[in-house]
Image: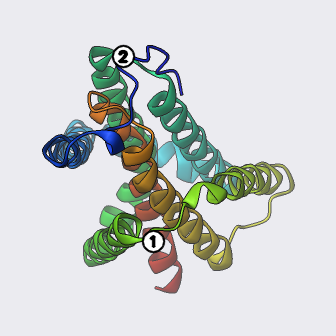
Amino acid sequence: MAFTDQSISTPVLYADEATRSTFLVKVYQHLALAIVAFIGMEAALFATGLAKLLGDFVFSGGSFRWLMIMGGFMLVSSMASRSAHSLNKPAVQYGALFAMAAAYAFIFAPFLYYVFIIRESATTVWSAAIITVAGFAALTAVAMTTKKDLSFMRPMIMWGSIVAIGLIVAGAIFGFELGAIFSVAMIALSGASILYQTQQIVRKYPAWAYVGAAVGLFSSVMMMFWYVLRLLMSRD
């Protein structure tokens, strides 16, 4: 990480209990803020008709453009993770947080337009949201209570992300669909990322870096929601 000044880079793990509790509260407050910002931006895209335009663009291009959207999703997730580990100015981190919310709103727009308008499956969206929240809560509890160091998961998550990007690119080039098995694998990958990041925000982040910590968690939550929704839609 780029927290190079020793006077401000001490992980919150070594702070007193009150400081750790305050830090975690701020992390999850900012995660909730990012989700609210995403919902607001998504509503604006639907209200202005931009969601329909994005949906029409994707649908007119067949599976290739869907795969482009999925590739964009992986790219934004990677950028979010990098931002969370390299930004050392809270003001800039706020910009990254809202920029990620906006990026995800645009990426989700055609998919949600398809679900809400074309398939008329609003209940599926809420089911996916409930499953994602429940999964996130369970994974957070595990990460917070386990005494095992989860650092070994980082290479696995990185390798899994590279493989996923390779499959998306191959699907776009050769025109094959990434089905339910791929969605299940990506849900597992996002779950592993949530486990790893949740533990790391306490062990690696200083007390002032709560916005950067929220950026990384937000990315993983959105990836889980995307693939849970995709899996549920594949069953309809």
Query: What amino acid type is highlighted by mark number 1?
Result: Val
Q: Position of residue 165 (x, y in %)?
A: 72, 49
Mark number, residue 179: none
Q: Is 54 left or right of 19, judged from the image as shown?
A: right
Residue 109 seen in the current view: no
Q: What residue did someone put label 2 on?
A: 7
Query: Residue at the spot x=37%, y=25% of the render?
Result: 96
Compared to 173, does 192 lie above or below?
Answer: below
Colour treatment of the image: rainbow
Answer with mark 2 or mark 1, whichever residue precedes in sequence: 2
Q: Is 228 left or right of 29, judged from the image as shown?
A: right
Q: What residue did someone put label 1 on?
A: 228
Q: Is 153 left or right of 80, judged from the image as shown?
A: right
Name the secondary structure under disc 2: loop
The answer to which of 171 and 204 lies nearer the viewer is: 204
Name the secondary structure under disc 1: helix
Classify the position of the N terminus by image quarter: top right
The answer to which of 67 and 39 lies nearer the viewer is: 39
Mark 1 is surrounded, within 10 Å at the Cα level, by few (under 14), some (14 to 19) or many (20 or more) other residues, namely: many
Q: Position of residue 94 (x, y in %)?
A: 28, 24
Query: Residue at the spot x=71%, y=52% of the render?
Result: 155
Q: CA distance from mark 2 to mark 1?
A: 42 Å
